[in-house]
Amino acid sequence: MSAPLGLDAADLAAVEALVRGAGTSFYHGMRILPPDRRAAMYGLYAFCRAVDDIADEPGSFAEKHAALDGWRARVAGLAQGEADDPVTRVLAAASLRFGLRRDDFLAVIDGMEMDAQAAIVAPDLATLDLYCDRVAAAVGRLSVRAFGDASEAADRVAHALGRALQFTNILRDLAEDTARGRLYLPCEWLDAEGVPHDPAAALAAPGLAPVCARMASLAHAYFRAGEAAMAECDPRAMRPARLMGATYRALLARLERRGWAHPDRPVSLPAWHKVWLVLRHGVG
């Protein structure tokens, strides 16, 4: 039997090790995929992790811009099968097999450049939506093709679920982002509640809770929109998306139960809950 995507087993093992070592909650969603599609998702995750690390690691913007440009050049070569390491070899094979679009890869890199250029602090709603589209929905547009559905409805799943997941991440990581001088809550909502734009001051402001509740409400709306779009898609292809959506929806519910008075108190799903979600959404 040939290896997934016709690739060298060592390349596949190296990319899977990167994903497993990252401890991502998406790992379980990837495991339920057939081998070729699973390998493609491992490659996509490794790519996202690589460009995200460029944005987050210390260094000047010029250095980060050069590193991200290096990835733009690598992406440009994927359609011709050009690759120089295990990640790009997996991506090249996956792009050919599943029709992964260069523009979506480039959008992810553009999103990381938004983080690399300067700390994002209280963006306006339009900028926040653009950021979410690049760092989350674009990943979704790549992922649904790897899952097995390249329809317009699948792109709508990516649009809605990407935003729902990113909003949940923003709410979960408020304290961590503040430590990095970042604040992803929109300035229009902060101003409406009298919350300062300074990240540390915002975290202690009385008006923070209604702003967070407003973002949570919008995340729920996007979860619902994603579910509605999934109903028009190949149900088998959407199994990983359903699992990821259910996982993050459960996380958002736990954040809401904790409340917004102490955003520095970490929230996560226990292992039993993750296993239950895999059994419910990933099997059958």
Image (spheres, grey):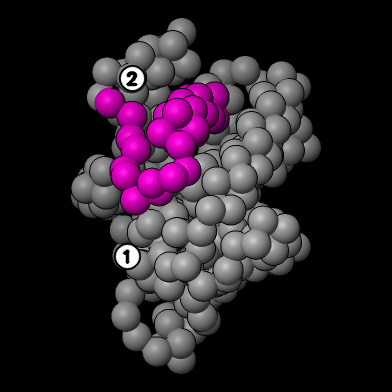
Report x, y in % for residue 183: 52, 64
Q: Kindly indicate whether the residue at mark 1 contacts the one at mark 2 (C-beta within 8 angstroms).
A: no
Is 91 drawn above or below residue 199 in the view shown?
Answer: above
Amino acid under label 2? His
Residue 126 quadrant: bottom right
Spot the residue most to the front. Answer: 206
Residues 169 and 160: in front is 169
* Residue that badge 2 annotates: 273
The magenta stretch spans which residues?
Answer: 241-270
Q: Which mark is residue 103?
A: none
User: Which of the 4 quarters of the picture holds residue 32?
Assistant: top left
Q: Residues within 10 Å of mark 1 (few under 14, many from 20)?
A: few
What residue is shown with label 1?
Answer: 85
Residue at image location 52% in from the left, 81% down from the top: 117
Query: Is residue 207 rendered magenta in the image?
Result: no
Circle 2 crowding by C-alpha within 10 Å: few under 14, some 14–19, many from 20:
few
Please tell me which of labels 2 and 1 falls first in the chain. 1
Q: Main secondary structure of the magenta part?
A: helix
Report, in whole angstroms, how far the alpha carbon at label 2 lies from the one at label 1.
36 Å
Residue 194 is situated, as x and y percent measured from the top left of the image, at 65, 62
Residue in the picture at 38% in, 46% down: 262
Vertical comparison of 159 with 199: above or below: above
Q: Is residue 243 above or below residue 7?
A: above
Q: Position of residue 143 (x, y in %)?
A: 55, 42
Tell me what residue is drawn at x 72 percent, y 58 percent.
192
